[in-house]
Image (cartoon, grey):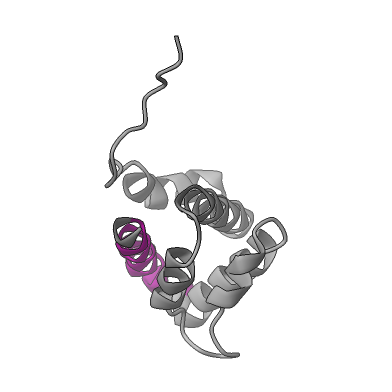
Amino acid sequence: MEAIAARTVALWTEVARVLVPIIGQRGMSALYERALHLAAAQHRWLGQARGEDGELPVFSSLARAASEQAVDDAIASVTTLFETFDRLLVTLIGASLTERLLKPIWDVPSAGPIRQDTAP
């Protein structure tokens, strides 16, 4: 579970590094908080990962909350959050620019083992 939490923080930190020069720290914070709010409709625990009003995104809060979940739920929830964030960003800057900026981040190989189907 620690590897998932660490990978989550690393990915979000990289997203912020890429986007803050374009949409600003406040824009990044607002977009992240909105994605958390929307994704929490499917995965309630994501509501625990929100910062205080006006606070910069604290990705360690997300990692801490994720580490308290079952592995499969944490992975599904964080994936939903990334997808939600991506959709919101597309509405702001367009699909082409979003893909150009975030594709290198999303395409990083998984930090965990690959699960294989063992069914006959």
Magenta part, dominant SS: helix
| Residue 23 image offset from top left, x and y in percent | 48, 71
**Left or right side of 119 for 43:** right
Judge left or right: residue 31 versus residue 20: right
Q: Which of 21 and 66 is in front in this view?
A: 66
Q: In which quarter of the image is residue 4?
A: bottom left
Identify which residue is drawn at 34% across, 68% down: 13
Q: Count how many numbered circles sit on residues in the image.
A: 0
Which quadrant of the structure image shows residue 108?
Answer: top left
Where residue 59 sits in the image (x, y, percent)?
41, 73
Which quadrant of the structure image shows residue 120? top left
**Magenta region includes residue 111:** no
Q: Which residue is drawn at 45% across and 15% down?
A: 119
Quadrant the N terminus occupies: bottom left
Percent from the top left, x then y, of residue 72?
49, 47
Residue at (55%, 45%) from the top-left corner? 95
Instruction: Read off the magenta span.
Output: 4-23
* Residue lying furthest top: 120
Q: Magenta segment: does it hold 17?
A: yes
On screen, 24 above or below 109? Answer: below
Provide residue 77's location: percent of width, then percent of height.
Answer: 55, 54
**Front position in the image: 4 or 16:** 4
